[in-house]
Image: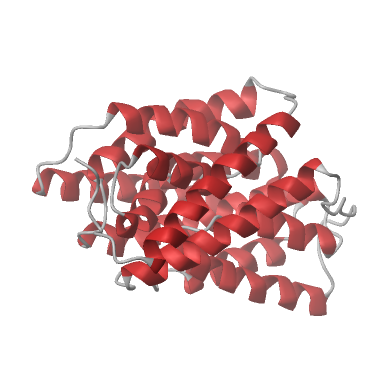
């Protein structure tokens, strides 16, 4: 029953998100999707479905190509990737959702949603510094994966009460960080694995947290000026076929070398963000 309810809610969230984005984009005359945004969605959401995450690589892409001001990154990330992540969540709920403890799944989702929506109007330098430092942490997590230092996890489908409370509390914090444009996947996977959960079962939890909090965040982000609708719409369109391809066609893909590449690119983006935060540079995209 709970699984069916979540799937129905995801469908409603998807319809609401599409309506919200296109109404706001049309009102501003920005409803034409960006071709580069479409490519970003294709690439980053493909690997996101495989567990790499899409926020850090997309941020690195934005910074390398100088596509938009730093203050626009959290909104564009959260809204652009929301629809592909909803599709991801539905797929993993169907494939693995019945195996996950319902209290853990719903508790983490609600906590993440409650933690989101706090930084739409945060100072630009705060966003730059927080995202920059978080990207360094993300790069460290990618490197740890390559070196075999990530926790292997256990075989449990649920957690005892003290660990359940801990997991829910941490996901509240991760929801806050999501609104800053900091990915939830890697820290959620590490936390749940350390607590003894079967790592496979972290996927429906991770994707569902993001699938519910990102559309909620979108309500504030689309009403603000800190968002690029051409990129958002391009990512939304490109991300859906990428998710379906990764989930149903690609069964196994060697990820080690790709993760090392992501480490390099993410560190580069982090350095650019921190440099921008520590210097009095204009918050305008390059012409």
Q: Is residue 3 above or below residue 286?
A: below
Say whether residue 100 is left or right of residue 30: right
* Of residues 282 and 99, the one drawn nearer to the viewer in this rendering: 282
Q: Is residue 3 visible?
A: no
- Where on the picture, by quarter, is residue 163? bottom right
The residue under the point 64% across, 59% down is 137
Residue 233 rendering spot, x and y as whole percentages: 29, 38
Quarter of the image containing the C terminus? top left
Q: What count of labels does the image hold?
A: 0
Residue 34 rendering spot, x and y as whole percentages: 26, 31
Residue 271 rendering spot, x and y as whole percentages: 50, 54
The residue under the point 34% across, 56% down is 70
Say whether residue 101 is left or right of residue 26: right
* Of residues 125 and 187, the one drawn nearer to the viewer in this rendering: 125
* Of residues 8 and 251, the one drawn nearer to the viewer in this rendering: 251
Say whether residue 269 is left or right of residue 80: right
The residue under the point 30% across, 55% down is 72
Say whether residue 48 is left or right of residue 234: right
In the image, farthest residue toward the front: 279
Quarter of the image containing the N terminus? bottom right
The residue under the point 76% across, 73% down is 164
* Of residues 68 and 86, the one drawn nearer to the viewer in this rendering: 68
Q: Is residue 230 visible?
A: yes
Residue 286 rendering spot, x and y as whole percentages: 24, 43
Q: How is the image coloured?
A: secondary structure
Q: Is residue 51 above or below residue 256?
A: below
């Amino acid at each position: 029953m709970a699984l069916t309810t979540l799937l129905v809610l995801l469908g409603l969230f998807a319809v609401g998100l599409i309506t919200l984005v296109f109404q706001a984009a049309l009102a501003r005359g920005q409803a034409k999707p960006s071709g580069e945004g479409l490519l970003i969605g294709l690439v980053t959401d493909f690997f996101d479905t495989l567990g790499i995450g899409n926020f850090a690589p997309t941020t690195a892409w934005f910074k390398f190509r100088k596509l938009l001001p730093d203050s626009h990154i959290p909104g564009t990330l959260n809204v652009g990737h929301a629809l592909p992540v909803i599709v991801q969540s539905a797929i993993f709920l169907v494939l693995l959702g019945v195996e996950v403890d319902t209290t853990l799944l719903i508790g983490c989702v609600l906590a993440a949603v409650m933690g989101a929506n706090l930084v739409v109007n945060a100072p630009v330098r705060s966003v730059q510094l927080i995202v920059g430092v978080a990207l360094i942490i993300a790069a460290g997590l990618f490197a740890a994966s390559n070196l075999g230092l990530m926790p292997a996890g256990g075989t449990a489908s649920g957690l005892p009460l003290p660990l359940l409370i801990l997991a829910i509390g941490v996901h509240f914090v991760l929801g806050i960080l999501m609104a800053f444009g900091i990915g939830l996947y890697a820290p959620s996977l590490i936390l749940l694995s350390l607590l003894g959960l079967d790592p496979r079962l972290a996927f429906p939890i991770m994707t569902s947290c993001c699938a519910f909090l990102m559309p909620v965040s979108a309500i504030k982000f689309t009403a603000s000026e800190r968002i690029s609708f051409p990129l958002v719409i391009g990512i939304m369109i490109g991300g859906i076929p990428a998710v379906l391809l990764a989930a149903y066609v690609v069964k196994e893909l060697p990820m080690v070398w790709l993760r090392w590449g992501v480490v390099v690119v993410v560190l580069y983006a982090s350095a650019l963000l921190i440099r921008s935060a520590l210097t009095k540079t204009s918050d305008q995209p390059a012409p």
